[in-house]
Amino acid sequence: MISINVLLTTIGRPELSSRMLPSLVNQLMPHDYLTIVSDLNHKYVAECISEFNFKCPVFHIMNPSALGHWGHESRNRYQNNLMGDFIMNGDDDDRYTEGALDAVRQYATDTNKLYIFKHENHGGFAWSTHGVVQIGNIGTSCGVIPNRKDLPTWEHFYGGDGRFYEKLSQMMPYEFIDFVIYKVRDTE
């Protein structure tokens, strides 16, 4: 069975304990990993983590100074040193849908292929155009990324996540999966 490492970036928003972590606690299995990188409010983030009884190993990385850029620089710093077969990226103020990781385990069977799922964002969806990997059609949390040690960088501009996936799609085959695994901020 594949293992998933969910890489969360946070500045210690309250939604970490009210939305994101509750959405993962019963979906991550003992062979999975949760890596939480905090830019700010490290003590609060540690307290949030301690509220939940995860079955998998949980790693809390505290950046000595904020790296910013929507978590992109934290992803750059740590993504090539993670455990697990696949990496999934998330933010502290969002949540994974019920059954998201079961769907990932069902579809993500080739550890040399990028899988691109949907996420809901303020009533719309990323991706909206099937098969198109480009800025504006893909978001941070859409990808189930093979854990390679040569992943491209997340650039420091709004849309840097789309550029990351553009580069990644040139390195490996990819498949679009029409299943919503993630909901951004205020989408229920």
Image (cartoon, rainbow, N blue to C red):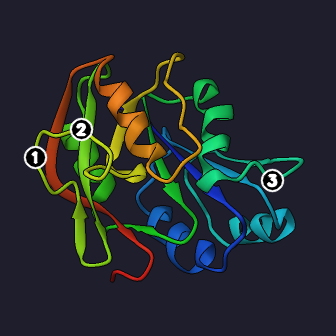
Residue at image mark 2:
133
Residue 1 visible to the viewer: no
Sequence order check, earlier mark of 1 and 3? 3
Asked if residue 40 lies left or right of residue 93, the reply is right
Residue type indicated by callout 1:
His
156, 29: nearer the viewer: 156
Spot occupied by residue 6 in the image (x, y as percentages of width and height): 50, 47
Q: Quadrant of residue 144?
A: top left
Residue 66 badge: 3
Residue at image mark 1:
130
Q: Relative to 149, say whether 46 is above or below.
A: below
Asked if residue 100 lies left or right of residue 62, the reply is left
Residue type indicated by callout 3:
Ala
72, 149: nearer the viewer: 72
Sequence order check, earlier mark of 3 and 2? 3
Spot occupied by residue 108 in the image (x, y as percentages of width and height): 25, 35
Tell me the SS state at disc 2. loop
